[in-house]
Image (cartoon, grey):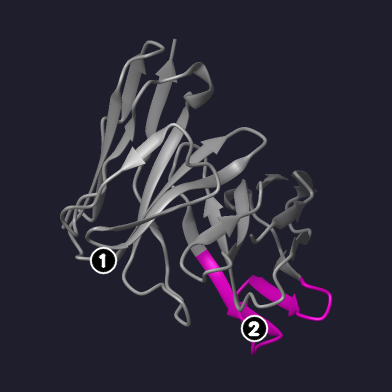
Amino acid sequence: GENVEQHPSTLSVQEGDSAVIKCTYSDSASNYFPWYKQELGKRPQLIIDIRSNVGEKKDQRIAVTLNKTAKHFSLHITETQPEDSAVYFCAAKNKAGTALIFGKGTTLSVSS
Amino acid sequence: DAGITQSPRYKITETGRQVTLMCHQTWSHSYMFWYRQDLGHGLRLIYYSAAADITDKGEVPDGYVVSRSKTENFPLTLESATRSQTSVYFCASSEVFGRGNTGELFFGEGSRLTVL
């Protein structure tokens, strides 16, 4: 089945710096890659997603890039703020295309 | 509009006991999912359902049972709880998800289960 690897597991940055989280997937047929953010004690929520026919997608300070050849995709957060501190999960669809398989998460800490 | 709700939010039980975690959504979403969240493992898929009376195994289904007799409910039962099932359990739903489609997963608030 699909396997999603996520790195790093923890990331600490200073406010205003950029943060990059990377994920790789195993199933070359995967075509949908969302990112979820989970604040402490809260539920995960979708922040951005990308489909396989697009190489990059931006939404204000966040962007996702996809390299289908290398089977990896990345989340980029620019001008980080303390409220960006959270756990971020990447995901890809399972082999049947009917559920999401998540990476193990990255704990991002933004210090002011 | 309650959205998606889980109950109980917190549960302490003993090994060998049966426990049922409830999940209810008011959107009539077709797809529903159960994940468990553990430190170092992220979110792991237990079971999911594409519609009423249709369920499928995820990554870690052993020790769990699900049912979906009604579209809005997707209970998760631990038939004989073990300490390794201590975790935070998240239910999620999606309006459009299956093969060829994409859709946002809406998560419940989670149920924290401790098995002593």
- Gap in Å between the C-alphas at discs 1 and 2? 25 Å
Q: Chain of mark 2?
A: A
In terms of secondary structure, what is the magenta stretch mainly? strand
Quick check: B74 above or below B30? above
Q: Position of residue A4 (x, y in %)?
A: 69, 57
Q: Residue at label 1?
A: B29
In the rendered structure, the answer to whether residue B76 lies left or right of residue A89 reads left
**Residue B43: % across, % down:** 55, 45
Graded by Cα atoms within 10 Å as few (under 14), some (14 to 19) or many (20 or more), the crowding at tag 1 reads: some
Question: Helix, strand or loop at disc 2?
Answer: loop
Span of residues in magenta: A47-71
In the picture, the disc for residue A52 is 2
Position above or below: B20 against A75: above
**Tag 1: amino acid:** His
Where residue A45 appears, as percent x and y from the top left, is 46, 57
To the question of a shared chain for discs 1 and 2, the answer is no
The chain ID associated with circle 1 is B
The amino acid sitting under disc 2 is Ser
Q: Is residue B7 above or below residue A5?
A: above
Residue A77, position in %: x, y? 69, 64
